[in-house]
Amino acid sequence: MTILRPIPVVLALLLAVGACGGESGTAAIDTPNGPRYVALGDSFTAGPGISPVDSRSMECARSNLNYPRLVAKAVDAASFTDVSCAGATTANVLETTPNPGSTAPLKAQLAAVDPDTQLVTIGIGGNDSGLFSSLSRACTQQGDACAAYLEDRLPDVLRSTRGHVVEVLRNIAERAPKAQVVLVGYLRVVPEDRGCEALGGAALDTGRVADGEAAIDAMMRAAARTAGATYVSMSAASEGHDACTADAWTNGLVPELGDGIPLHPRKAGMQQVARAVEQAIA
């Protein structure tokens, strides 16, 4: 495949992988000690393409090496349920939604949380209103489309998404009043100051996309503060580990087989997110 021409399609489709948000093939592990742990979220939580993938998760494409799995092992979770799903939005967390191509609806991720839950991690928001895909699409067009999106459209999308994320966090706290609730931010995909072949060269306005990523991180931090949740930002931590670097935590357009999908976390990225979460809950 060529690099430059398919970038808008690749970015738009792969930053919001899939259309699922339920608990297809819920992963559950019982271990003797530690908190009762439930993981919710979208593809940056699920880890599609990182081998080995849990075959029971079907279209949700959860990796057995995603950060929730690593955290569950590190904290010796008494029980662990992962209902993260590629393509999930806040609506998929809160509500049972139709499942395209199936008569069975997608169960709300929130249903996995109960009063006995002691730890909840969630990474969500990037797919609401096509947030990531719209940003990437605008910033691969010529002219002023990228700047116009950042100035005219993104602020409204962020305000709306912040409200939805706050609603999700408050619903989690209501269902599990004794739980520590941790909102997990997104790893950087692009650098601030340059393009690279891994991201298609000059076709992507990486500087402005980086501005958008920073705005999303700030929105999530504000949502966690409003809802009284812990926020784990991966923005500063992943500086210098974007897809253009030798020590990349996220993929460019052509990932290595078994190490994630384009423009999503690699195994190394999942390991770093797990460490950050472990420090936050220690």
Image (tube, helix red, strand yellow):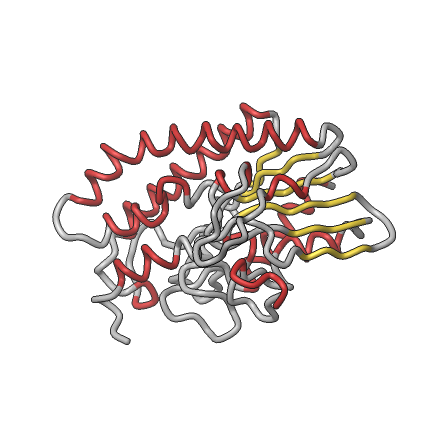
Q: Which quadrant does the N terminus fall into?
A: bottom left
Indicate left or right for 163 with 122 as reference: left
Q: Residue at x 23, y 48 (%)?
A: 138
Q: Residue at x 64, y 45 (%)?
A: 277
Residue found farthest to the front: 103
Q: Residue at x 54, y 62 (%)?
A: 61
- 23 or 214, nearer to the observer: 23
- 98 or 103, nearer to the observer: 103
Q: Position of residue 166 (x, y in %)?
A: 52, 28
Q: Is residue 179 above or below residue 40?
A: above
Residue 70: quarter of image: bottom right
Q: Residue at x 38, y 59 (%)?
A: 14
Q: Is residue 223 above or below residue 24?
A: above
Q: Is residue 43 above or below residue 201?
A: above
Residue 67: quarter of image: bottom right
- 213 or 181, nearer to the observer: 181
Q: Position of residue 194 (x, y in %)?
A: 29, 56
Q: Which quadrant does the C terminus fall into?
A: top right
Q: Position of residue 199 (x, y in %)?
A: 32, 63
Residue found farthest to the right: 32
Residue found farthest to the top: 226
Indicate left or right for 182 with 44 as reference: right
Residue found farthest to the left: 143
Q: How many marks?
A: 0
Residue 281: quarter of image: top right
Indicate left or right for 102 with 148 as reference: right
Q: Position of residue 251 (x, y in %)?
A: 43, 63
Indicate left or right for 25 with 140 as reference: right
